[in-house]
Amino acid sequence: MAHPIAEARDEGLSAFVRLWRRFVQRGRPDYKWVVIGVLWALAFVVGCIGFARRAELVGQTLSRLDIGYLALQLFTLESGAVDPPVPTTLEVARYLAPAVAAVTAVKALLLIFRQRYERWRLRRRRGHAIVCGLGSKGRLLAEGFLGRGQRVAVIERNPENKNLESCRELGAVILTADAAGPEVLQQAGIVGARYLVAASGDDGVNLRIAANARAARNSSDGGPLTAVVHLVDPDHCRLLRRQELASAGLSRLRLRFFNVYQSGARRLLTEHSFLTEEPEEAAPVHILVIGLGQMGRSVVLEAGRRWAPRWQQLRTKLRISVAAEDADRAAQALAEESPGLSEVCHIEGHQVDVARLGYGALERLCRSEGMADVQAAYVCLEEDSQCLPAAVAVNRTLAEMGANAITVAALSQDGGVAALLEVGDGEEFAGLHVFRLLEHTCTPGIVLEGTHERLAQALHEQYVRQQEEAGATRQDNPHLVPWDELPEWLKESNRRQADHVCVKLKQAGCEVISSPDWDPTSFEFSSDEVERLGRMEHQRWVTERRLQGWRLGPRRDDAEKTSPYLVDWQDLPEEVRQVDRSFIRSLPRMLAEVGLRVRRT
């Protein structure tokens, strides 16, 4: 057990460090200017006292105005040179006043030239992140990049934005300008940047930023830039995601289209899933979604996508009850937008106007016939002020009915009330969970995981499955590990493999399209196509390895960069060729997992 004195000492030291970082290292401007003002006043007062005391000692008569004038001259080094006797107060003032004046001048010059200096410094940076737009999403992403040690440049048009100073205190370089201007990206060091995030509230502005970034990087010799483009409209995001693959490998820009509602739905259903372990027989599952705004629609679509493999296996539909003001029309629009949804799910609409009828309407809905078997309720009302009380009402009612269900309130912002409702705060809220949308989605790890990145991960997972089915273990192959444990060079290799997918499909007269159809069995390559595309994949791999300095050797050795498979297709062992063929056959399934489908042109 730690000694109490030692604990108190450590706690005191930690508190001191926190205060040091808050007030000194981060340099809070208001605090520092107040201190400087106090020092100016102190130097003036001490100078006045010193000159008055000296006048008494030498028998000199000075008026108050004369004393004040002499004290002011101390700041400009004009009145401090006096003959003895020099009182202690005047001695202190003679050094304090010019020191305060010098500090003030330096700070003023830094404020004047800081913008120019920061732009000069950014042009020479390499590997940093650029965040355009400092709303709630941009602020969280900037803080996320800074938190993982990334250098960050922020471009914000509004100089009065309340988030600017907090980001500057954390170490970000701030540019107050319109990020849609191509010259502004140059000032932010786009040539050497590794990441670009366009997070303004205007889809058109974000797309222009990405276009300017592509032009800047294609005209430079820098490495690949990952550009995350936030799109407010989920439909636009879904339609443009195919461009992530179509543009991969054709420029030095890797696009990631990002929508908080679609990403939030994936994260929500991962953390609070309605799925249990893989069943051996068909088991009915019933979920309730309250609110069919952008978040509610995304949750319904993601639930259908996650249920699709189970439907293909068991042919049992997922039952989804949706409650909204115009539920029937919204459910019909969902079915039209996503034809595959009605194949795997049975959607029931319930007209509930929470704003007009209150939370009693939700209680009556939960007590209605057929709701006792609800296993998960997702409350996705657009107003946080309505969402949280509605979730409490639903959770309480389902518990009173004896339903073994979880209830999740999807909040855009966390105003602090949500902390009171975390699981474990009391029996009244047992089974109730709070999902903070922006906090869970506006992180570098989430936004960088676009369609291209998810496909690269799917490629690795497919490779691991193939190797394990062939009897390989981690002792035989140390790369049979989850994606997060892969070395960065192997992650990049999978990304380059994903870059080449559209090139292969074009050679086979095919293309990828955004599709709500989640059945990957709707497309198959012919035997000739499998052989031809497998050969292309092997040739791509050989070229990639040779560019990285690998050479032919008797065995695979990552340290020595040798491999026995750096040979032509016809010289490969049959089991290795079969790996490439299996990859080609699996492409439609892997693309379906990220919301894309292969079709012949």
Image: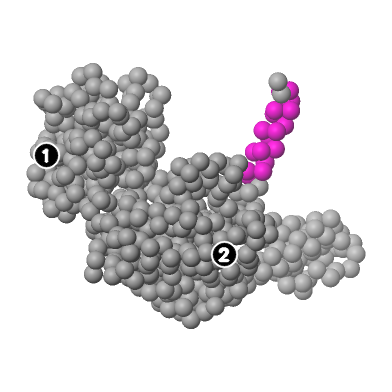
* Relative to 536, residue 412 above or below: above
Amino acid carrying label 1: it is Gly
User: What residue span does the magenta drawing correspond to?
Assistant: 3-19
Q: Which residue is located at x 25 percent, y 51 percent?
A: 521
Query: Which residue matches tag 2?
Result: 566
For the N terminus, which image quadrant? Answer: top right
Q: Secondary structure at mark 1?
A: strand
Residue 555 lies left or right of residue 352; in this view the side is: right
Which of the two discs, 2 and 1, labels the residue nearer the N terminus? 1
Q: Position of residue 232 (x, y in %)?
A: 29, 59
Q: Which residue is located at x 38 percent, y 37 percent?
A: 271
Q: How many marks?
A: 2
Q: Which residue is located at x 52 percent, y 64 percent?
A: 571
Q: Position of residue 62 (x, y in %)?
A: 76, 66
Rendering quarter of residue 375: top left
For the residue carrying disc 1, how many other residues have a C-alpha within 10 Å: few (<14), some (14-19), or many (20+)? some
Which one is closest to the eye, mark 2 or mark 1? 2
Residue 244 lies left or right of residue 92; in this view the side is: left
Q: Main secondary structure of the magenta part?
A: helix
Q: Is residue 89 magenta?
A: no
Q: Is residue 9 magenta?
A: yes
Query: Which residue matches tag 1?
Result: 349
